[in-house]
Image (tube, rainbow, N blue to C red):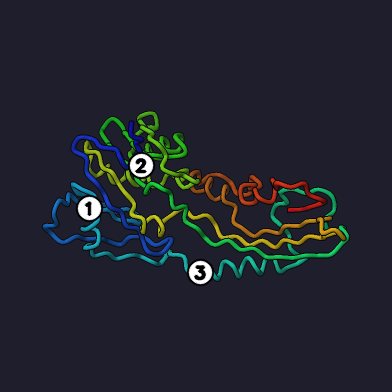
Amino acid sequence: GTAKFGIDARQPGQLYAAIRHSPRLGGLLRRATLPDGLPGVRGLVEGADYFAVVATGYAKAATALEKAEVAWDDSKALSVSTNDVFAAYRAALDQGTAFKPRWVIDSAGDAAAAKGRKVEATYEAPFLAHATMEPINATALVTDSGVKIWAGHQSGYLVKLLAGRAAGVASDAVEIETPYLGGGFGRRADVGYIVKAVEIARKFRGTPVQTIWSRAEDMRDDFYRPAAMADASATLDGEGLPTGLTYRIAVPAVTERFVSRIFPAAKGGLLADRSTVDGAVFPFYGLPPSQH
């Protein structure tokens, strides 16, 4: 047999959408227009921070997308740069003993009291797109009675909840067909791509529409793995074995931000986010007194 992924979904009368988001994070769409007479084009859909061209084939939709005249609203766009983020991390970590970590994830013994030769290092990781193996996509059919979705995802509950909201139906009226994932890495746990596919398909009620993110679009509008900076220090005995180890890490709380986007009413600071520091909390080696 042949493995089927979300992008392989084919339904009678299916249309295809190419999507374009604001080039700046937090930017919004003012308006988008298309010239008349573009081959195969069935319409243009405007969203809060994106627009999409719907056509009889993806290549036709993607070609028409490049011909659109677009005006973006950058008044609420982020003005922070990668350099700004790392400067803020560095400033926080440079407070030395005045540095007050939001959470101490794990602690054993007294690393500060460990004796021996001290070794220090700083590690940085940039913002990274997940770059899933299969391009991000979702196919949606919106009818008066409910929604049918064909898409790889990592949370059926969130798909039903948020797709139902986008279509104006109860979550029980959302049916999901889940093919092979095509690579998730956490990217497909944030189901905004499915929500937007439903918003687009809602404008073509009764017709299935497959929305595909180009590779370039996915890189520009991913749910990024956050940048991080870590100061690590260790004390070593005469044989070079560690007698103490300390990690001090500056990184956004991924789980907290994810939950707050999906459930805005959720209060911040509820959970210590171990997912951001797994490599320090669950090391592969036996450790001396340590804190991280």
Q: Position of residue 248 (x, y in %)?
A: 71, 59
In the displayed structure, does residue 259 sit left or right of residue 282?
left
For the point 35% across and 47% down, the residue is 196
Label 3 vs label 2: CA separation? 32 Å
In the displayed structure, does residue 265 sit left or right of residue 33?
right
**SS at circle 2:** helix
For the point 61% across and 58% down, the residue is 251
Which residue lies under the disc numbered 2?
166
Would you place residue 138 above or below residue 126 in this image?
above
**Numbered disc in front, either 2 or 1:** 1
Sequence-wise first label, 3 or 2: 3
Would you place residue 275 above or below residue 175 in this image?
below
What's the residue type where badge 2 is placed?
Answer: Ala
Q: Position of residue 198 (x, y in %)?
A: 32, 42
Would you place residue 55 above or below residue 156 in this image?
below
Q: Position of residue 289 (x, y in %)?
A: 82, 51
- Locate the N terminus and report the quarter of the image it occupies: top left
Estimate how packed mark 3 is, as few (under 14), some (14 to 19) or many (20 or more) residues with alpha carbons within 10 Å: few
What's the residue type where badge 3 is placed?
Answer: Ser
What's the residue type where badge 1 is placed?
Answer: Ala
**Numbered disc in front, either 3 or 2:** 3
**Numbered disc in front, either 3 or 1:** 1
Label 3 vs label 1: CA separation? 34 Å
Which residue lies under the disc numbered 3?
81
Residue sitting nearer the eye, 12 or 197:
12
For the point 47% across and 56% down, the residue is 129
Sequence-wise first label, 3 or 1: 1
Sequence-wise first label, 2 or 1: 1
Estimate how packed mark 2 is, as few (under 14), some (14 to 19) or many (20 or more) residues with alpha carbons within 10 Å: some
Label 2 vs label 1: CA separation? 26 Å
* Numbered circle sitting on residue 59: 1
